[in-house]
Image (tube, rainbow, N blue to C red):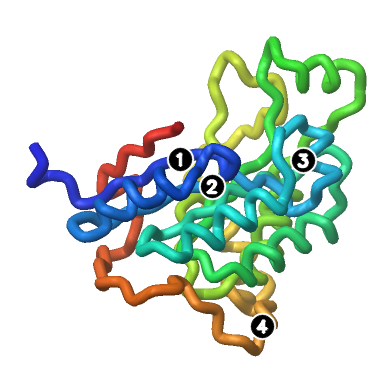
Amino acid sequence: SDRDVVGISIGTRPDCITDDILSLIDGYTKKYHVWIEYGLQSIHDKTLRRINRGHDSRIFLDAVQRTKNTCINICVHVILGLPGETEDEMLETAEAVASLGIQGIKLHHLYVAKNTALAEEYFQGKVQTLDMNTYIKLAVGFLERIPSDVTVQRLVGDTHGNFLLSPVWKASKAEITDGITQEFERRGAYQGLRYTSSVSVTKHAISCPSKTMEGQETEALGFHTINI
């Protein structure tokens, strides 16, 4: 029933959002804890073209700025290990995301699924995927650059069982999460350690009612993400 609903999280592309849609979704913030999840994947336009993303970083940044004129919380999705990207370029994406004043982030690793264009490139040797230890180190380096008040809603992506070609990691998500925690401890590091902005970043451009949720762990609270 409606009484059981505490929040709404809507996953979409930045080129699918309009001011009318934002206004409609913003109307729910008076009653619910509302998120929009935007797929950025990378801040680098050459990478977005390489993966046929269909939009550039400018469209993403515009969607974020327009959403900040509402009371909708913003979560950004990023993929580590995209074709052709160096570690420095992935960390540049972290720094770009850190400057936006968003509320949440979800990290994913690149994986190759069967019967896809990426699979063809993988078999041709044009695409490589990350091993687990490399991903763990990249994820920690990324999060060192993300402000400590940004909620990390995902640390590693989900793969699709029999459809997965690569990478095949012999570890559960919980074990990968533990590995990330251990890498933070090994470095003596923490989320936000390398966040260098001296400017206070505004989360919303308008005054919004506070709707805090203990822990903000969306999966544990039974959130259902609607992809549009």
The local secondary structure at tag 3 comes to: helix
Question: Whole-Å distance between the Cαs marked 4 and 2?
Answer: 23 Å
| Residue occupied by mark 4 | 197
Q: Residue lying farthest top?
A: 115
Name the one closer to the observer, 53 or 77. Answer: 53
Q: Is residue 43 visible?
A: yes
- Give the CA distance from mark 3 to mark 2: 14 Å
Label 2 crowding class (10 Å Cα cut-off): few <14, some 14-19, many 20+? many
Q: Which residue is mark 1?
A: 11
Q: Amino acid at mark 4?
A: Ser
Q: How far separated are the C-alphas under marks 3 and 1?
A: 18 Å
Report which residue position mark 3 lands on: 48
Please tell me which residue is depicted at 56% across the width and 29% down the height of the picture: 159
Please state which amino acid type lies under the numbered disc 1: Gly
Task: Provide the residue designation for mark 2.
Answer: 38
Mark 4–mark 2 contact, CB under 8 Å? no
**Disc with the residue nearer the chain's start (4 vs 1):** 1
x then y, percent, for residue 36 = 43, 49
Q: Earlier in the sequence, mark 3 or mark 1?
A: 1
Label 4 sits on a secondary structure element that is loop
Question: Where 175 sits versus 105, above or below?
Answer: above
- Residue at horizontal 78 percent and vertical 63 percent from the top: 92
Give the camera-side residue of 169 and 213. 213
In space, the residues marked 1 and 2 are separated at their CA atoms by 6 Å
